[in-house]
Amino acid sequence: MPSVTRVDPKTIFTPEEWARVSTQSVWMGPGLVVFAWAVIIGAGALFIYFPNPLTYVLAVMLIGTRQLGLAILEHEAAHGTLHPNAKLNDWMAEWLCGGPIGGSLKRYRPYHLTHHKYTEQPEDPDLGLSRPFPVTRGSILRKFVRDLTGQTFFKQRIRQGVAPFISHLQGQTRKQPRVQDEPGRRFWITNGVLIVATTAMGYWWAWPALWIVPMATWFPLVTRLRAMGEHAMVNTQDDPFTHARTTLANPLERLFIAPFWVHYHCEHHCFMYVPCYNLEKAHKLLLQKGYRERMRITKGYAEVLKRCGSKGEAVAA
């Protein structure tokens, strides 16, 4: 199928408005990376200095959401909008964002840009994330249980990670990735730094308890919620303003589910080279210009869950 229709920003914004939302900051991208790691360190310190079940659950949720935040910043870099310097943009994504969580910018960028080119069409590599919906509430609950109990992590990380070694031992030839990269090497180098640093401070248990546990539980859950909020049940039409959903997240949702303006996904798909920190500005301008009725906007993630768990019910887009 042909690629999806694109929005020409010149037909919507004045030159001054477009410059305001599209101009990249030299400092914002690095600042967001520092902020993500500051929250991770702060959440870990909260539990270390005030150890109890409540602070541990809070730390796992905050760190897991910031791991998603690192993935979002890697996504930002895939569009070249984490920093105006291309080399610094890619380096931050590979070593400070994607590396510690096992991501690969080299593999993700062509994959993700294909998603933008064929959003919600058969060629869209992310179609499997939105196609199953709506489902029953019980189905969503079972998915969340698998996420929070580490089953999703085991399936996506452990099983896939050891599969090449098992195939090698069995003498089988596995299909090589189209883009050659070594995300495993960056993962263990960056995580090795975390292990050495926390062990040197006397907290040898911090890496498994405050990094791997969030990665195995809360991170998969909020990643699933992100995917549901972005494209599930948007009833895509030829109008590019219907290709993705914006979820009006409240402060708690932004803290525990949707960091770094990721919930402004309609705006991101319409203007995919607008930096994430300017998406809210773009959103407000679009509302001022009367685009509200064309956009897919949902109030909060509870409403997203209601729509996605509405199998057998008639729910408007």
Image: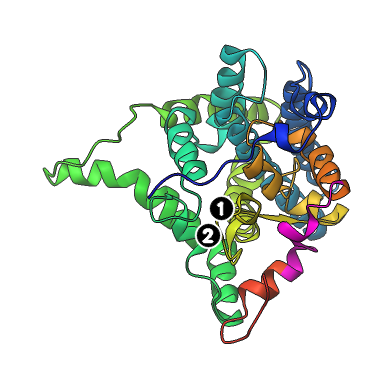
Q: Which type of secondary structure does the marked residue at label 1 adopt? A: helix
Residue closer to the observer: 252 or 211 = 252
Corner quadrant of residue 309:
bottom right
**Mark 2 = which residue?**
150
Residue at x 72% of width, y 58% of height = 294
Q: Quadrant of the C terminus?
A: bottom right
Q: Is residue 204 visible?
A: no
**Earlier-in-chain disc, 2 versus 1:** 2
* Total residue callouts: 2
**Furthest residue toward front:** 11
Amino acid type at image mark 2: Gly
Which numbered dot is residue 59? none
Residue 55 position in % (x across, y down): 81, 53
Residue 109 position, x and y percent, is 48, 32
Relative vertical location of residue 83 with respect to residue 112 in this rendering, above or below: above
Q: CA distance from mark 2 to mark 1?
A: 5 Å
In the picture shown, does residue 83 fall above or below 171? above
Q: Is residue 177 visible?
A: yes
In the rendered image, residue 127, in percent from the top left (x then y), is placed at: 46, 57
Asked if residue 195 lies in the magenta stretch, the reply is no
x%, y% of residue 201? 71, 27
Which is more toward the observer, 177 or 141? 177
Please report the bounds of the magenta region as a residue range. Answer: 289-303
Residue 184 lies in quadrant? top left
Q: Which residue is mark 1?
A: 216
Q: Residue at x 63, y 40 (%)?
A: 7
Mark 2: which secondary structure? loop
Does the magenta-highlighted stretch encompass residue 301?
yes
Tell me the residue at 75%/40% (across/down): 260
Is the C-beta separation of discs 2 and 1 under 8 Å? yes
